[in-house]
Image (cartoon, helix red, strand yellow):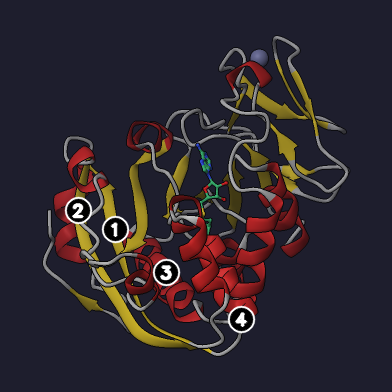
Amino acid sequence: MLPKGRKSSKGAHIISILRCPVCQKPLLPTADGYQCAAMHSFDAAHQGYVNLVLSHKKHSKEPGDDPEMIQSRRRFLDLGHYRKVSDTINETIRAVLSDLGRPSDCSVLDAGCGEGFYLQRLKASLTHGSKGQPQIHYHGVDVSKFAVRQATQRDRTMAWFVASVNDLPFLDASLNIVLSVFSPANILEFARILKQSGSLVFVSPGPRHLNGLREIIYPITKEHEAPSITDKAKELFSLATISRITYPLELKDNQTINDLLAMTPYYWNINRETKAKVAALDRLQLDVDIEIRVFYKNCCGTAMKEKLAPATDSKSVPSRS
Ligand SMILES: C[S@@+](CC[C@H](N)C(=O)[O-])C[C@H]1O[C@@H](n2cnc3c(N)ncnc32)[C@H](O)[C@@H]1O
Ligand SMILES: [Zn+2]
């Protein structure tokens, strides 16, 4: 059995399901952060997160989203434009937990958590009316320290880490649910850290996501293809459900349109003229089209496929894989 969690001196809930990024031994909480049996230690920053990225493993000086992108994302998300997406994610995870038999001492990871919007709302949703229910431990990981810093401001009681999805600082078979929202995914790592009955909830753009913006950027707008994870996951996971959320969105001010652009990969891919064209807009009508896939680790995939109902305010669609 893994050691139980405890409160750090900074107030964050720390659970010893962590793995030392240097020697892969368990990381145990100390007064200042974490330490493994081989004495590799990692101090918590004063904001309350712990940086577990080893400097020689960084691919750039400041990997992940930069402070400007994080601020744009926070402003945009706090306006509530993706609240429906977050609500559907929460309903999906509620259904997954129920099918897992509401495990005691349940651990959830948001892998590529950004500035913490989805994990904070997940916690608020699952905590609501949960008196007497088993405790859930929430973990958020992002390779951008700027993102994680912002995330700690949303909720310091959750465990936030700077780390890469390619080298997740968790012990094998230690988590019940991995959530991945519009972030890079490493299917092998997800399979490694999930328990036998664990589930991956994978959120990605649907075929028409951000049409309206994309039509301004590209002369011909192609539909988004099914995410490559569907193929990569085949051997390790079973796809249980796909839910799709679609709704029109009208953005009515220049700041919000620019914030949305800065949240997308288009920001880096478009030329200066196109960027200026979008930057000058005061109104934009677009489609939100998001898919949520629930995968189970293969040992129990078939059983779960039969048991799990789709999220209530979304519809199931056939897999495009
Ligand atoms: C499109 S954003 C999504 C953030 C958040 N899930 C959301 O939807 O608001 C992608 C995030 O992945 C992070 N990221 C990029 N590469 C990563 C990696 N290798 N490991 C962990 N996070 C990564 C970025 O820093 C960024 O915060
Ligand atoms: Zn170590």
In the rendered image, the residue lying farthest to the top is 38
Categorize mark 2 by other alpha carbons within 10 Å: few (<14), some (14-19), many (20+).
many
Alpha-carbon distance for marks 2 and 1?
Answer: 6 Å
Secondary element under disc 1, as helix, strand or loop, is strand
Tell me whether the residue at label 1 lies in contact with that at label 3, contact meaning CB atoms closer than 8 angstroms. Answer: no
Amino acid marked by disc 1: Val
Secondary element under disc 2, as helix, strand or loop, is strand
- Please tell me whether mark 4 or mark 3 is closer to you in this view: 4
Alpha-carbon distance for marks 4 and 2?
Answer: 40 Å
Alpha-carbon distance for marks 1 and 3?
Answer: 10 Å
Q: Is residue 265 above or below residue 62?
A: below
The residue where tag 1 is placed is 294
Secondary element under disc 3, as helix, strand or loop, is helix
Amino acid marked by disc 2: Leu
The residue where tag 4 is placed is 254
Secondary element under disc 4, as helix, strand or loop, is helix
Task: Determine if residue 85 is in view.
Answer: yes
